[in-house]
Amino acid sequence: MAIIKCPECGHQISDKAPTCPYCGVEIAGKIVKCPDCGEIYFSDEELCPHCLRPTRPHTHPVTTDETLSTTAPPEAAPPAMTSSSSETTVKESRMPQTVPPPTLHTESKQVPPTPPVKKKAGKVAIIVSFVIALLVFGVCYYMYNQAQENRENEEYDIAMRSNEPLILQGYLDSFKDAPQEHRDSIEAHLKAIKQAALDWSNALASNSKAALMDYLNNHPGTPHRQLAMHKIDSIDWAQSNNINTPEAYQTYMTDHPDGDHYDEAEELMKKLKAQDITPEEKTLVANVFHNFFVAINEKDEEALKNTVADEMTLLNKENATKGDVVDMMDKLYKEGIVRMVWRLPGNYDIKKREVADDRYELNVSFSANQDVEFIESAKNGTNKFKVNATINPDGKISLFKMIKIVE
């Protein structure tokens, strides 16, 4: 037994195998070995497919004497001869005769048979099929790789736009062979998201405006921005309530023009402003009444008119005019009075009331002392009065009532 190469598929097999275990072609008794080149091929092939040596040598028929006798044309009978000719004939007969070479029946010149191509065609078909299979496999593999690459690119874009850690981790788990720059970008993005989540938890736990502002500055694109601003709004509102001054509420309104407590802050600020008398307002009250009583002391009608509104409540008269105020001054100078001096202790009790947006009237209560000198000095004396008055938003007296205090 010898190991040979299957002439059909080329695999190494036993020359005693009934059939090739790889391609199924018959082997035992169906193959020969070329004595010239050693090629193993099928015995039914006429020529060695390698060196074209005939599998079986061609034999030509040999022409025998019998063949010649049967095939040679009959000779004509020799003519009668004379004695001399007979003798000559005998001599000739005794001489060795050269027998002409037998005439062979020449066969028509045979063209060497065309080498069989059956087995070669089979090999070519196998090779072509293998090449086609390789091409198909290559195309399919290329298309598969392209599909995988396209899918990876799509998932990469989705992950990079996402702020969900699960999506980013899913990409890393699904595309372990992705380009390293893609994986590095996803890992950095995931790390930043986790850090942002930790920063947000710390900022919430601190309940500090500064911590929340730092978080917003460090994470400008955070989805928690609205909630962080709401927390800051609540913190600032609580601080304004604790201070409870118009300035504190104004600061809140400036910092939070769309704040949750803007309207409430505005209302409280107005109430506080109505209760809170500013230094400017105190100065205004002192100046108005100083000018009013100095004008009476000096009997200066024009100066007196400049301190009152066009219409006012004067003593018990409503809708009084500036002329009515001058009449009041004249009545104060009774007959026999030479000089009058009004002195104001400055004990002003001031209350505010809003009459329009950011416009306030001031209700004032205070005491006033009147020193009077008569022609008859025995009548000289001091009178005390309780004054209730109102100064309108324009800084003019719109109400003036005065009651003498009897002791």
Image: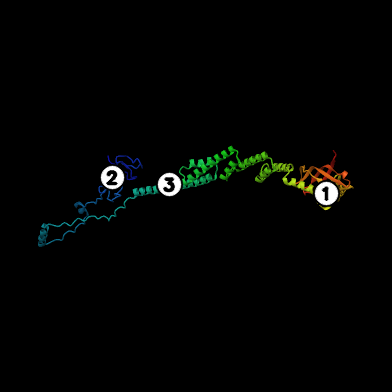
Left or right of 400, for residue 202: left
N-term mark: 3 or 1: 3
For residue 62, the mark is none
Residue under label 1, please give it. Answer: 297
Foreground disc of the pair 3, 1: 1
For the residue carrying disc 2, how many other residues have a C-alpha within 10 Å: few (<14), some (14-19), or many (20+)?
some
Q: Quadrant of residue 29?
A: top left
Task: Identify the residue at horizontal 72%, vertical 45% (top origin).
Answer: 279
Task: Depth check: give the residue in front, 204 or 314.
Answer: 314
Q: Secondary structure at mark 2?
A: strand
Task: Depth check: give the residue in front, 119 or 373.
Answer: 373
Q: Secondary structure at mark 3?
A: helix
N-term mark: 3 or 2: 2
Assign the N terminus to one quadrant of the image: top left
For residue 137, the mark is 3
Left or right of 259, for residue 163: left
Question: How far apart in space, not on screen, are marks 3 and 2 (Cα)?
Answer: 38 Å
For the residue carrying disc 1, how many other residues have a C-alpha within 10 Å: few (<14), some (14-19), or many (20+)?
some
Residue under label 2, please give it. Answer: 32
Query: Which amino acid, mark 2?
Result: Val
**Extreme top residue here?**
205
